[in-house]
Image (cartoon, rainbow, N blue to C red):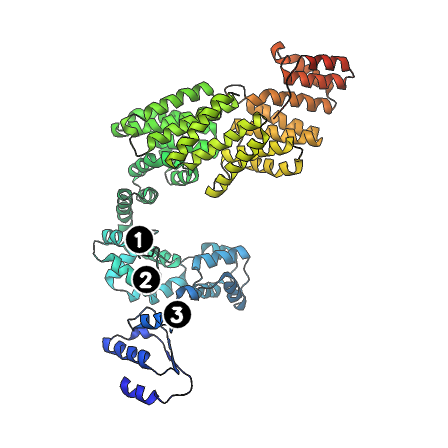
């Protein structure tokens, strides 16, 4: 038949388009062979348009190689945000841009999904709420996906889709494990080829995910038809992910299955790496998946909660959870006690560092390094990571104690080790505090250079909101302020103020307040400067030992008082200081400023004559 048709078409001189829809319905091999013959041997004037839901073996690879094939696939048919906007406008639906963007993201540009959303939105009283709640379980979308996709599949395929819908991504081995069948990878590949809302995630087509709306529908059907299986599926998935080295996925599935013991062990085992990798936000998300009462009842979880509170900005809450963890440590199984000691050691070190307690930091750093030799610290690379953390924490605390030589040495050693073991977060923290050392030493060019290096590292890795980034911001601001570039300094101080949480990082918060006061003093905004310096003094009260900035803050605070005309108050404040404190260079400079304001130039000269200190940031 095709041979006769080709013979009849041979004299064709005008362009002719032959459109064949639903080509995937060609069931017999013979029908496909006849179509392939027509495609390959048809006259040049004959052009074909084939519409199919999935690829057929029609020799199209030869046409593709020869440049004779134009393909329009699912990716080309996805609506852009602008096209989605036009579709809703044509349907008479007005949406705020945020709601439109949300619907576009949820549908992944799927034209039918957008059309169904537009139909449902017509006359809806709260379009923004509809957009926020729109999912594959919405009735019109669910009806479409059930009829056009799910119900067209065999029982075997439906079982695979439903049971694997709990996963964010799936491969053949996981699919087989959850279904008890074989050939899961083949089924997933065939579904992807058929454009059945299955998306390949890698070139090898071994990992897949489901379209968001389709996943919503599948999860709804799983709850409706096999709710008892869902926890078992999550538990099986958790074990598989844990065995194959995917801890975050394992923790999430263990939590859904309410296997709290497995979830705690997994998070405890991987917490040091997450913490030292700058992934405190990930830890916080994982902890949110546990019941609130579990934090107090489980010692290991309490230790993790302490670290989380420290990262989120509450020293008091961190110390409270740390106490719970210590008191509950005896109830921890013997096989987990070593791991708990590592967690407690790291948290104690971080708390002492935040308090500026140098003796405690030195003690905890020494203990932590000793733990690296213990059997329970034998995780790959953990010993070196703990040593790098100990060195950088020690150096950081020494900065604020004005022990610059020791701080520089420890920070340099910690940074070198962090670079060697591939821990850029530790390197970044050390670099920011080295910038602080140079700022305190008045090596402004080097301070600015190291600040900018730390800021670039933060930008590259997404750590721009970390406290160490705040240190780099504020040191750069101080350098710019002392160079008289006040307008350039302002945005950096503002960034630091948004980044640093003063109650959680009193030393960093004190530095930010000091920088703000310095800038306002330089601008002549003496009242604002005084407010900043007083805030700095309040933060100093949270520290275990006097910070190197406290005297400088106090001296500048006195100068601000004098410039505001509060000379009597400044006089009383100086008188209240101890004799040794009054003899310090910064206070003598403030005293000289006061004497000049009181019109006592000789007394001012006398105060300065006994001081060799120049007030530097």
Above or below residue 8? Residue 172 is: above
Q: Quadrant of the C terminus?
A: top right
Q: Are marks 2 and 1 in contact (CB under 8 Å)?
A: no
* Helix, strand or loop under label 3: loop
Dot 1 falls on a residue whose secondary structure is: strand
Q: Earlier in the sequence, mark 2 or mark 1?
A: 1
State the CA–CA distance, disc 2 to disc 3: 16 Å
State which mark lies toward you, 2 or 3: 3
State which mark lies toward you, 1 or 3.
3
The dot on residue 192 is 2
594 with respect to 537 (left or right): right
Q: Residue at the location (50% across, 65% down)? A: 83
Q: Nearer the viewer, residue 326 or 241?
A: 241
Earlier-in-chain disc, 2 versus 3: 3
Task: Judge by depth and name the residue closer to the eye, 272 or 481.
Answer: 481
Please identify the residue farthest to the top as the structure is shown.
Answer: 579
As drawn, is 442 to the left or to the right of 377?
right
As displayed, is residue 191 above or below residue 40? above
The answer to which of 239 and 233 lies nearer the viewer is 239
Residue 184 rendering spot, x and y as whole percentages: 25, 57
| Residue 153 in sight | yes
Q: Which residue is mark 3?
A: 71
Q: Which residue is mark 1?
A: 170
- Extreme residue toward the right, this view: 599
Marks 1/3 in contact by CB < 8 Å: the verdict is no
User: Along the polypeptide, which appears first: circle 1 or circle 3?
Assistant: 3
Residue 263 figure quarter: top left
Q: Along the line of sight, which residue is nearer the eye, 590 or 585?
A: 585
* C-alpha distance separating marks 1 and 3: 28 Å
């Amino acid at each position: 038949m095709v041979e006769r048709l080709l013979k009849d078409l041979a004299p064709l001189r005008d362009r002719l388009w032959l459109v064949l829809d639903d080509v995937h319905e060609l069931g017999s091999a013979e029908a496909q062979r006849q179509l392939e013959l027509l495609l390959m041997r048809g006259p040049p004037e004959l052009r074909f348009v084939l519409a199919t839901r999935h690829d057929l073996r029609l020799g199209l690879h030869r046409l593709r190689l020869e440049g004779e094939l134009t393909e329009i696939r699912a990716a080309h048919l996805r609506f852009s945000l602008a096209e989605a906007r036009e579709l809703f406008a044509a349907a008479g639906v007005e949406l705020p841009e945020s709601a439109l963007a949300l619907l576009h993201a949820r549908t992944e540009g799927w034209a039918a999904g957008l059309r169904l959303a537009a139909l449902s939105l017509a006359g809806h009283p709260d379009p923004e709420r509809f957009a926020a709640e729109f999912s594959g379980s919405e009735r019109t979308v669910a009806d479409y996906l059930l009829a056009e996709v799910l119900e067209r599949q065999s029982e075997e395929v439906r079982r695979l889709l439903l049971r694997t819908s709990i996963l964010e991504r799936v491969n053949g081995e996981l699919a087989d494990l959850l279904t008890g069948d074989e050939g899961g990878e083949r089924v997933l590949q065939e579904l992807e080829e058929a454009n059945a809302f299955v998306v390949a995630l890698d070139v090898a087509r071994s990992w897949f995910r489901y379209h968001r709306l389709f996943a919503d529908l599948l999860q709804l059907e799983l709850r409706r038809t096999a709710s008892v299986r869902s926890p078992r599926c999550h538990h099986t998935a958790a074990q598989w992910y844990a065995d194959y080295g995917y801890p975050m996925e394992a923790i999430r599935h263990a939590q859904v299955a309410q296997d709290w013991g497995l979830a705690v062990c997994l998070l405890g085992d991987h917490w040091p790496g997450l913490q030292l990798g700058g992934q405190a936000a990930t830890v916080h998300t994982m902890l949110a998946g546990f019941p609130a009462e579990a934090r107090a009842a489980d010692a290991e979880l309490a230790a993790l909660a302490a670290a989380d509170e420290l990262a989120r900005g509450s020293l008091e809450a961190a110390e409270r959870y740390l106490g719970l963890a210590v008191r509950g440590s005896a109830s921890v199984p013997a096989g987990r006690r070593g791991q708990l000691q590592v967690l407690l050691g790291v948290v104690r070190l971080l708390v002492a560092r935040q308090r500026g307690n140098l003796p405690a930091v030195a003690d905890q750093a020494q203990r932590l390094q000793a733990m690296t030799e213990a059997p329970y610290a034998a995780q790959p690379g953990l010993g070196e990571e703990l040593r790098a953390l100990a060195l950088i924490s020690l150096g950081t605390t020494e900065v604020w104690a004005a022990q610059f030589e020791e701080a520089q040495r420890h920070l340099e050693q910690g940074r070198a080790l962090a670079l060697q073991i591939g821990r850029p977060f530790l390197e970044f923290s050390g670099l920011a505090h080295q910038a602080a050392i140079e700022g305190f030493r008045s090596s402004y060019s080097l301070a600015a250079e190291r600040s900018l290096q730390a800021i670039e590292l933060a930008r590259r890795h997404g750590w721009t909101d970390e406290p160490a980034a705040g240190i780099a911001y504020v040191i750069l601001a101080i350098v710019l302020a002392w160079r008289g570039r006040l307008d350039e300094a302002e945005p950096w101080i503002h960034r630091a103020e948004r980044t640093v949480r003063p109650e959680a990082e009193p030393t960093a918060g004190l530095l930010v307040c000091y920088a703000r006061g310095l800038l306002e003093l330089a601008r002549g905004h003496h009242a604002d400067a005084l407010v900043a310096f007083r805030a700095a003094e309040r933060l100093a009260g949270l520290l275990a030992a006097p910070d190197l900035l406290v005297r400088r803050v106090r001296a500048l605070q006195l100068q601000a008082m004098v410039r505001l005309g509060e000379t009597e108050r400044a006089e009383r404040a100086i008188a209240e200081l101890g004799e040794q404190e009054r003899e310090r260079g910064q206070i003598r400079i403030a005293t000289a400023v006061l004497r000049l304001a009181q019109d006592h130039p000789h007394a001012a000269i006398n105060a300065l004559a006994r001081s060799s200190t120049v007030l530097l940031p």
